[in-house]
Amino acid sequence: MTTIEDPQTYAIIGAALTVHQELGPGFLENVYHEALAIELEQRAIPFKHEVELSIFYRGRPLNTTYRTDFICFDVIIVELKALPAISRREKAQVLNYLKAANFRRGLLINFGSTSLEHARLVNNWQTSA
């Protein structure tokens, strides 16, 4: 599925591009969190900020939880970074969030480079709800 076939992901990336064009690289990650929340709100993109995700083992919740930056449209995990470049480690983090939430789609967005970087990730381990 490309972003053209996925208008929700396309809309989130568009909001992130606007934030990056306005602020550029170099700020701390929290600055981008606040700015993206404003941009998502202005574009009427539904979101929740800093959502706690439970992790289960053999049907039992663990004490350890994850906290994702955003959940948009109630189905897309969005993780923000402000790094020189994104690596497999950051992608693995988003994939783990997708597994914990049992979501199919995720976006990793990096504001730290000269051009906005984004990676669309898909959870192939999704179980039926």
Image (spheres, helix red, strand yellow):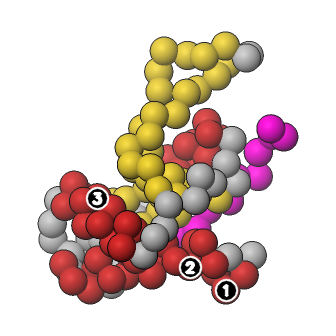
Residue 28 falls left or right of residue 59: left
- Residue drawn at x 59%, y 52% is 74
In terms of depth relative to the viewer, which is nearer, 111 or 83? 111
SS at badge 2: helix
Q: Which residue is mark 1?
A: 4
Of mark 3 and mark 2, the one earlier in the sequence is 2
SS at badge 1: helix
Up-down relation of residue 79 to residue 54 (above or below) = below
Find the magenta span and give its range.
Answer: 118-129
* Residue 68 % position (x, y): 44, 45
SS at badge 3: helix
One can see residue 57 in this view? yes
Tag 1–tag 2 contact (CB < 8 Å): yes
Q: Which residue is mark 3?
A: 33
- Residue drawn at x 64%, y 22% is 56
What's the residue type where badge 1 is placed?
Ile
- Residue drawn at x 80%, y 38% is 129
- Inter-mark Cα distance, 3 to 2: 18 Å
Q: Which mark is residue 10?
A: 2
Name the quadrant containing residue 24. bottom left
What's the residue type where badge 3 is placed?
His
Residue 52 falls left or right of residue 30: right
Tag 1–tag 3 contact (CB < 8 Å): no
Of mark 1 and mark 2, the one earlier in the sequence is 1
Magenta segment: does it hold 23?
Answer: no
What's the residue type where badge 2 is placed?
Tyr
Neighbours of disc 3 within 10 Å: few (<14), some (14-19), many (20+) = many
- Residue drawn at x 25%, y 67% is 35
Name the quadrant containing residue 21. bottom left
Neighbours of disc 1 within 10 Å: few (<14), some (14-19), many (20+) = few
